[in-house]
């Protein structure tokens, strides 16, 4: 088993991430045959759900309490927006997802028959164009920062797969390889790469999870147990798991080989069951479960997936459904990696310990707080180092031009960005810029009337895709306002709607799960304050002006005392 997993970090992956376009049919058609598309119980004939080999298993991993992240390229089309929205809903980090302007995201057409058989047609899009050079140039640091790295053989070119696994291996990060298609299909049909690259990828992977059809080609044997052991020995893996659908799964770590029967469920759609299995397998490894419990958790995830349309877990129910089937050692509902002291973590993982709150956790929780401060400081330093001298110039020009024509400045944001926005509006007001906060939730219910044609609206959003904010931005631009974006994604919908962009790149948040806005909001605040100070300097705001705006409180008293002394 794998014991050297750093639970203070995320499991991250690259590979297939798509929208599954699902049609229910009476049967899967063969060559020259026709079949019928059937409406579901609501009358719909097509369902669109986020999916893809890698994104699926990361989503199921996240449902099992493991912090997860995806890296790679996506398009700026409707499907890309859907994928990113689902990642946000499931708490999957996408700070290392690069959105390519004018490009399409991947999708799959999935035909699901009444007997739960399926046929899948994949449009690989940008995933198929990802090269080893891209991996090294854009994603190496993210790979090195991970607890585990997972990738696949189905859509990602093999040279990119090898690059991912090699970077992780050199950094001492455990790796997982999902061999979703047989070798001959990957090499001869899909053209993913050479046989040599396929073999090298398998030698670099710590965990190998071949689908049944792939395993049949990878090792000659009479039984799946022998086949798993043969793959383990041939490639030097640390764990091999073979999924066999209704027959369950076989898992070996070289010391023991176990077969775990499948959970009996009435399958509705077997799409992605192997992906869900892998998500549970990764979670079991991450939480330090025994080999048998890890396989049982993986089987339970695969079984619950068969009850759903598509392959993506459902928030609020899928985890509960898995726990109802899983009978092994308990896993935490939400992993807070840094509540476990580093010196204790390896032992606890090896024993499959329950990471509930204990008396000894309090001291290490303080360490987590200090680490959060350190990571935020590092994010701020990195942000500052990357800012050009002219960083604020375009935004300042937009604001000054509006002011010269009698316009005003408004600030808006949702969630934690709302609080940063209120602080920015207050700072602008106190340093000579007429500014007002606009609640985006109320904007389309009359409050957009506070914004006149020619006014400037500063919109804050780390993702640049928040639905409520974008609805407000669309109304404001239609009414003649000019938008300035403070965002972490310069290719986001918000950025594309803006006359000026203050890009605030933050690779990851500072907290234990890497999810709560911490480093990103601190960097937003720093940039917001920088903009306010730049405007203050340009308009020649004096100490006397400051005293006039701050007559009350200790600050006002200090300014008055200073004036008296002079």
Image (cartoon, helix red, strand yellow):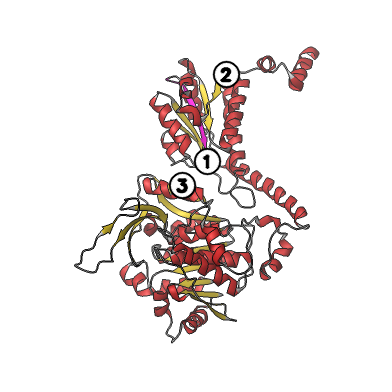
Give neighbour class at mark 1: few <14, some 14-19, many 20+ (Cα, 10 Å). Answer: many
Marks 1 and 2, Cα distance to the nearest angstrom? 29 Å
> Which quadrant would residue 517 be assigned to in this image?
top right
The residue located at (41%, 69%) in the rendering is 180
Label 1: which secondary element: loop
Residue 539, numbered circle: 2
Label 3: which secondary element: helix
Q: CB of mark 3 within 8 Å of CB of mark 2? A: no
**Dot 1 or dot 2, earlier in sequence:** 1
Q: Which residues are magenta?
A: 453-462
Of circles 1 and 2, the one toward us is 1
The residue pinned by badge 3 equals 85
**Dot 3 or dot 2, earlier in sequence:** 3
Q: CB of mark 1 within 8 Å of CB of mark 2? A: no
Residue 405 shows in the view:
yes
Give neighbour class at mark 3: few <14, some 14-19, many 20+ (Cα, 10 Å). Answer: some
Foreground of the two, 26 or 413: 26
The residue pinned by badge 1 equals 462
């Amino acid at each position: 088993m794998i014991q050297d997993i750093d639970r203070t970090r995320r499991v991250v992956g690259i590979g297939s991430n798509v929208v599954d376009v699902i049609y229910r049919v009476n049967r899967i058609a063969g060559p020259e045959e026709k079949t019928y598309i059937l409406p579901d119980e609501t009358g719909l004939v097509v369902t669109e759900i986020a999916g893809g080999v890698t994104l699926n298993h990361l989503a199921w991993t996240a449902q099992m309490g493991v912090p997860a992240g995806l890296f790679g390229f996506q398009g700026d089309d409707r499907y890309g927006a859907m994928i990113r929205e689902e990642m946000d809903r499931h708490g999957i980090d996408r700070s290392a997802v690069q959105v390519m302007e004018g490009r399409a995201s991947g999708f799959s057409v999935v035909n699901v028959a009444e007997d739960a058989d399926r046929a899948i047609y994949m449009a690989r899009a940008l995933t198929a164009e990802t090269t080893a050079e891209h991996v090294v140039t854009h994603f190496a640091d993210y790979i090195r920062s991970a607890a585990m790295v997972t990738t696949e053989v189905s859509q990602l070119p093999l040279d990119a797969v090898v690059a991912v696994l090699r970077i992780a291996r050199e950094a001492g990060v455990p790796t997982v390889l999902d061999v979703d298609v047989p070798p001959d299909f990957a090499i001869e049909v899909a053209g993913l790469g050479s046989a040599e690259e396929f073999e090298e990828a398998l030698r670099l992977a710590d965990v190998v999870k071949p689908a049944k059809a792939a395993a049949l080609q990878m090792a000659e044997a009479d039984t799946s147990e022998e086949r798993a052991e043969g793959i383990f020995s041939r490639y030097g893996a640390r764990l091999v798991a073979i999924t066999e659908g209704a027959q369950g799964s076989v898992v070996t770590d070289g010391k023991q080989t176990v077969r775990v029967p499948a959970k009996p469920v009435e399958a509705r759609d077997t799409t992605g069951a192997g992906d869900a299995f892998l998500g549970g397998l990764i979670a079991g490894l991450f939480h330090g479960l025994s080999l048998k419990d890890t396989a049982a958790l993986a089987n339970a995830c695969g079984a619950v997936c068969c009850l759903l349309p598509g392959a993506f877990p459902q928030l609020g129910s899928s985890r509960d459904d898995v726990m109802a089937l899983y009978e092994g050692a308990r896993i935490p509902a939400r992993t807070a990696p840094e509540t476990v002291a580093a010196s204790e973590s390896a032992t606890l993982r090896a024993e499959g310990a329950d990471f509930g709150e204990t008396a000894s956790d309090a001291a290490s929780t303080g360490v987590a707080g200090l680490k959060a401060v350190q990571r935020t400081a590092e994010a701020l330093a990195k942000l500052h180092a990357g800012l050009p001298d002219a960083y604020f110039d375009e935004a300042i020009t937009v604001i000054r031009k509006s002011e010269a024509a009698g316009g005003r400045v408004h600030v808006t944001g949702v969630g934690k960005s709302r609080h940063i926005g209120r602080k920015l509006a207050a700072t602008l007001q106190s340093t000579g810029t007429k500014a007002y906060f606009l609640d985006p939730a109320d904007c389309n219910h009359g409050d957009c009337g506070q914004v006149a044609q020619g006014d400037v609206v500063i919109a804050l959003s780390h993702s640049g895709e928040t639905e409520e904010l974008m609805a407000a931005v669309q109304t404001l631009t239609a009414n003649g306002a000019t938008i300035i974006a403070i965002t972490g994604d310069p290719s986001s919908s918000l950025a594309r709607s803006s006359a000026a962009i203050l890009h605030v790149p933050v690779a990851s948040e500072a907290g234990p799960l890497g999810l709560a806005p911490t480093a990103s909001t601190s960097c937003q605040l720093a940039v917001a304050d920088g903009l306010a100070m730049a405007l203050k300097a340009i308009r020649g705001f004096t100490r006397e002006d400051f005293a006039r705006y701050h007559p009350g409180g200790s600050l006002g008293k200090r300014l008055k005392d200073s004036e008296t002394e002079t």
